[in-house]
Image: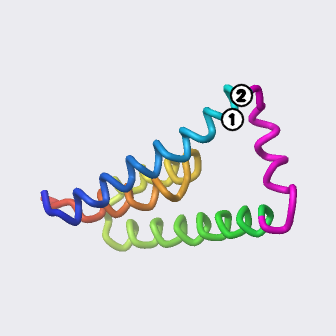
C-alpha cells in the first residue's frame, strides 16, 4: 500500500474518531442530540459553518457519483453514507482511499 493511501486511511479514521469524541462527550454531559442541532443556530458563525458543510457535502456527493459512473467503479460510493452520517472529515478521505486502490 502506498504512503498516500495510508495517509488517506489514517485521515479517515482520525476524521471519524476526533469529532465523535466531542459528540459523545456532549451527550454524556447530559446534552441531547436535538440540542446539538439547535447549537448550530446559536450565532451566525455556527449557521455559516453548517451551510459550508452542507454545500461541501452536496458537491462531494455529485463529484463522487459522476466520477464513479464515469469509471464504472461503484465501490468507492460506500464513502457517501459515511460522509453524511459521520462527516466529510471521514467520508472524503475514505473515498480517496477507496478511489486510489488497484483495480483488476
Question: What's drawn in magenta, residue-wise?
Answer: 30-45
Task: Report the front residue among 24 and 74.
Answer: 24
Q: How is the image coloured?
A: rainbow
Q: Mark 1: give few (<14), some (14-19) or many (20+) Cα within 10 Å.
A: some
Circle 2 SS class: loop
Q: Mark 2: give few (<14), some (14-19) or many (20+) Cα within 10 Å.
A: few
Eyeballing the image, is 65 above or below 79?
Answer: below
Count of numbered tags: 2
Task: Report the front residue among 28 and 82.
Answer: 28
Residue 61's x, y, as percent?
54, 64
In the image, is 37 to the left or to the right of 62? right
Whether residue 32 is in magenta: the answer is yes
In the image, is 36 to the left or to the right of 2? right
* Quarter placement of the N terminus: bottom left
Q: Which mark is residue 34?
A: none
Q: Are marks 1 and 2 in contact (CB under 8 Å)?
A: yes
Circle 1 SS class: helix
Between marks 1 and 2, how big is the CA–CA gap? 5 Å
**Which residue: 25% across, 65% down?**
100
- Residue 34, picture quadrant: top right
Residue 45's x, y, as percent?
78, 67
**Which residue: 57% across, 72% down?**
59
In the image, is 11 to the left or to the right of 49? left
Q: What residue is disc 1 on?
A: 26
- Residue 40, picture quadrant: bottom right
Q: Which mark is residue 29?
A: 2
Whether residue 11 is in magenta: the answer is no
Residue 16's x, y, as percent?
47, 46
**Which residue: 47% across, 66% down?**
65
* Quarter placement of the C terminus: bottom left
Amino acid at each position: 500500500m502506498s504512503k498516500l493511501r495510508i495517509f488517506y486511511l489514517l485521515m479517515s479514521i482520525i476524521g471519524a474518531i476526533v469529532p465523535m469524541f466531542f459528540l459523545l462527550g456532549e451527550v454524556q454531559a447530559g446534552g441531547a442530540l436535538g440540542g446539538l442541532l439547535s447549537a448550530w443556530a446559536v450565532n451566525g458563525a455556527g449557521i455559516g459553518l453548517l451551510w459550508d458543510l452542507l454545500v461541501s457535502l452536496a458537491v462531494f456527493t455529485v463529484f463522487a457519483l459522476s466520477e464513479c459512473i464515469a469509471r464504472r467503479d461503484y465501490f468507492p460510493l460506500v464513502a457517501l453514507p459515511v460522509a453524511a452520517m459521520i462527516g466529510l472529515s471521514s467520508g472524503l478521505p475514505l473515498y480517496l482511499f477507496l478511489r486510489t486502490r488497484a483495480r483488476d
